[in-house]
Amino acid sequence: MTARVTDVKAEVFKKQRWRWLLGKLWFVHPPVFLLVNASPGICLQTMAVTARPSTERLHHRNLFASGRRYYLTARERGFRLTTTSKVSWSYRRRTRSAAVMQATFSVIHNDITRIQMESHISLTNLLEFSLLPTFMTSIIVYIPWWHPSVIVGCIIALYTLSWFGHRYNATLEANEMVFFVQKALEDLEPAVIMSLEAKNLDVVYEQRDFDAEWEKFYRRHSDENHQKPAR
């Protein structure tokens, strides 16, 4: 019993570490869930119409500030969404997509649809972050009058600043896409599902509460296993 509980605890710990690593390196926005009283087809059609700027939908004009545009691609069980905006110093150029939203539809009951949205950094943006630091590194590494510690510090600073800059840009795009989906579907009737009571002793909501309860469960069963008389 003790070995089994230990294995389960180790597996949970590995999943938590892997989820934490993905959250720091890959995902740029916490998962967002929406409940809509409409079928997935209607949701896709509504978002596709909203993605096209029109004078008939002036209440959505904030979605297209700074020349922002949205690109919606339907998938088998959801959709893929990206966004770009105008480059301020070039009229015809547009920015590259820094983030990608992957959404999944789940039909709960009748026409009630649950939309789960997760946004991650795009592969292009992930690769581009190292281009400028690598170029600058190839220059400063051969400066003879700089101390090696200064060179190493500059290299670390270049890669760190570039990473945070690219990730920050992807996070901003993810926020814009979440805002777009929420605004596009706000005209549809929101779904209401009965929830649990606010104070339910059998339900654990916070991760730290789950860890505390799991520790209590582990200790209780460990004590029971040690107290069993040997046959």
Image (cartoon, rainbow, N blue to C red):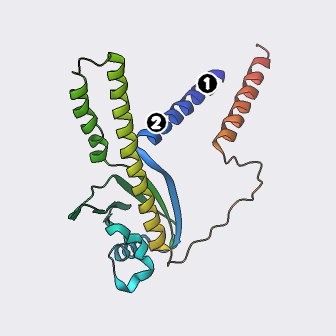
Q: Is residue 109 visible?
A: no
In the visual, does 126 lie left or right of 62? Answer: left
Q: Quadrant of residue 3?
A: top right
Report the quarter where the C terminus lies. Answer: top right
Name the residue at the front extreme.
145
Amino acid type, residue under disc 1 in the picture: Thr
Instruction: Find residue 21 and name its label.
Output: 2
* Badge 1 element: helix
Q: Residue at x 43, y 76 (%)?
A: 60
Disc 1: CA contacts within 10 A as few (<14), some (14-19) or many (>=20):
few
Disc 2: CA contacts within 10 A as few (<14), some (14-19) or many (>=20):
few
Give the answer, above or below, for where 49 lies relative to 164. below
Separation of marks 1 and 2 at Cα, in angstroms: 23 Å
Q: Position of residue 196 (x, y in %)?
A: 71, 59
Q: Are marks 1 and 2 in contact (CB under 8 Å)?
A: no
Q: Position of residue 202 (x, y in %)?
A: 74, 48
Q: Position of residue 28 (x, y in %)?
A: 44, 48
Q: Residue at x 67, y 48 (%)?
A: 205
Q: Quadrant of residue 211?
A: top right
Nearest the viewer among 164 and 195 is 164
Q: Which residue is mark 1?
A: 6
Report the quarter where the N terminus lies. Answer: top right
Q: Residue at x 66, y 45 (%)?
A: 206
Q: Position of residue 80 (x, y in %)?
A: 34, 60
Instruction: Find residue 223 and name its label.
Output: none
Q: Residue at x 76, y 28 (%)?
A: 220
